[in-house]
Image (cartoon, rainbow, N blue to C red):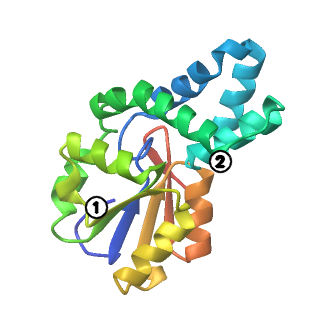
């Protein structure tokens, strides 16, 4: 992406794995939460997490409890797991490095074009992380779960009176691509820090 000419009226970024190199931290934390169930369950948990990156952790917790463990899932289970997960990852994500060229790009374009964040991280926690990293000045809006990527994109379009074709979603997960398809926005996929068509 360059800033020579304004091609889009707004850009919406996923957070983990798109702006910040934090995906490995979150993968490790999911495994840590379920390590008492044994290596086989941990492998299944990690496989599911990696297949559905960008999806709300509560959706994942429900699947892991009910499908992988055969246990009944309750709201309080999700809340307890989320609190433990947050403790494991928060400080590490705040300290995680930017992906290559991200900071330079944000610095160059944030005053020229509205930028937004759409993440599967709970919104209050996401805003706290963005603030602690000193990134909040770059973004007109910071959105997280429980809303899906599609709902967040639709909200950004509606609130800012934007036409879908003039908005670009940048992400590294299938949920980012699917959200952009539902909302009708453009999409750029990130793989190993390089832009690639999905």
Q: Above or below — where is 8 with respect to 129?
A: below
Q: Position of residue 47 (x, y in %)?
A: 70, 31
Q: How many marks overall?
A: 2
Q: Position of residue 187 (x, y in %)?
A: 51, 65
Look at the numbered disc 2 and give the secondary structure of its residue: helix
Quadrant where the image shows the C terminus = bottom right
Residue 157: tell me if it is visible.
yes
Marks 1/2: CA–CA distance? 36 Å
Quadrant where the image shows the N terminus = bottom left
| Label ID, residue 2 | 1
In the rendered view, does 81 fall on the left or right side of 36? Answer: left
Q: Position of residue 183 (x, y in %)?
A: 55, 75
Q: Residues within 10 Å of mark 2 (few under 14, many from 20)?
A: few
Q: Residues within 10 Å of mark 1 (few under 14, many from 20)?
A: few
Q: Residue at 43% x, 42% y: name it.
A: 16
In the rendered view, does 146 fall on the left or right side of 46? Answer: left
Q: Residue at 48% x, 53% y: name it.
A: 171
Q: Nearer the viewer, mark 1 or mark 2?
A: 2
Q: Above or below — where is 27 with respect to 67?
A: above
Q: Residue at 20% x, 63% y: name it.
A: 110
Q: Position of residue 105 (x, y in %)?
A: 24, 53
Front one among 166 and 123: 123
Q: Residue at 62% x, 53% y: name it.
A: 174
Where residue 157 sits, quadrant-wise, is: bottom left
Look at the numbered disc 1 and give the secondary structure of its residue: loop
| Label ID, residue 50 | none
Q: Mark 2 or mark 1, which is nearer the start of the sequence? A: 1
* Disc 2: which residue: 59
């Amino acid at each position: 992406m360059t800033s020579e000419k304004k091609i889009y009226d707004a850009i919406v970024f996923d957070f983990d794995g798109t702006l910040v190199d934090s995906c490995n931290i979150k993968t490790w934390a999911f495994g840590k939460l379920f390590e008492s169930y044994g290596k086989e369950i941990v492998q299944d948990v990690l496989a599911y997490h990696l297949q559905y990156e960008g999806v709300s952790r509560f959706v994942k917790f429900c699947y892991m409890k009910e499908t992988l463990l055969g246990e009944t899932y309750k709201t309080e289970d999700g809340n307890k797991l989320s609190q433990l997960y947050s403790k494991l990852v928060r400080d590490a994500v705040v300290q995680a490095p930017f992906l290559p060229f991200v900071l330079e790009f944000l610095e160059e374009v944030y005053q020229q074009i509205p930028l937004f964040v759409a993440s599967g991280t709970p919104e209050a926690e996401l805003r706290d992380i963005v603030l602690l990293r000193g990134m909040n000045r770059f973004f007109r809006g910071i959105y997280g779960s429980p809303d899906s990527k599609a709902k967040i994109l639709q909200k950004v379009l509606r609130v800012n009176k934007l036409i879908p074709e003039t908005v670009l979603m940048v992400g590294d997960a299938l949920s980012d691509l699917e959200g952009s398809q539902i909302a009708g926005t453009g999409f750029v996929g990130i793989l190993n820090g390089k832009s690639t068509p999905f």
